[in-house]
Amino acid sequence: MSIAGIVLAGGKSSRYGQPKMFETYNKKSFYEYSIDALKENHVTPILVSTNQDLLPYFQRKDVAFAAEKCPYQGPLYAIHHALTAIDCCAEWFFILSCDIPFINAEFVHHMITLTQTDSPDIVLPVQPDHIHPLLALYHRRTLPLIEQLVTQGERRLTQLLNQTNVLRVPFSAEDPTFINVNHRSDWHV
């Protein structure tokens, strides 16, 4: 089974006030935590999907980059762009956002092991009050539906999740892996 990694890092960071993927925690940029969690699990290739304005600021040379032609079109468009930009024949795509500095290799490994159960289209982590479609695995067979939804102008992931076989993986509400940094106060724990 082949798995490619995609780090989504092209958002506006409007609530944060500056590009949060370059904020640092323990002397490492937020986006690098996602890359390193994938690398530790031998996920390859890894693509960082961003926008043209942010592209020059990334320092990693061990991953590929792709700039969205039409940035800020929402998560479904971002995933579509990344899946069509990555140059590989992977069966699965592990999507991670760039603002999760507490992501770790153990979480990635656990999620990968679940791709072999029940033939899911999407392996989706869930907490009691949240779903995490930007920390999930998407099978290649979801790409035609993603393309259809994007063509129809859909921006959110709801329709995709409603029309595919989703394996929902429960996690506790206190799990720090899912701390998503939208405000400066979110990551000072």
Image (cartoon, helix red, strand yellow):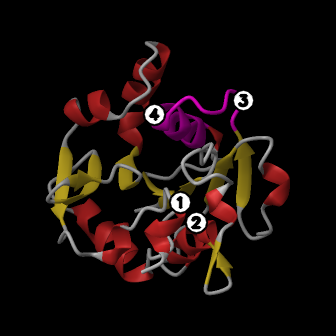
Residue interval drawn in magenta: 68-84
Question: What is the number of the mark on residue 69?
Answer: 3
The residue that mark 4 highlights is 76
Marks 3 and 1 in Cβ contact (< 8 Å): no
| Residue type for callout 3 | Lys
Which residue is more in the foreground, 84 or 99?
99
| Quarter of the picture holding the C terminus | bottom left
Whole-angstrom CA distance, mark 1 to mark 2, is: 6 Å
Marks 4 and 3 in Cβ contact (< 8 Å): no
| Quarter of the picture holding the N terminus | bottom left
Marks 1 and 2 in Cβ contact (< 8 Å): yes
Instruction: Identify the residue at image location x=55%, y=38%.
Output: 78
Q: Residues within 10 Å of mark 2 (few under 14, many from 20)?
A: some
Question: What is the number of the mark on residue 5?
Answer: 1
| Residue type for callout 2 | Thr
Which residue is more in the foreground, 130 or 163?
130
Instruction: Identify the residue at image location x=29%, y=48%.
Output: 122
- SS at mark 2? loop
Whole-angstrom CA distance, mark 4 to mark 3, is: 14 Å
Question: What is the number of the mark on residue 82?
Answer: none
> Which residue reaches farthest bottom?
26
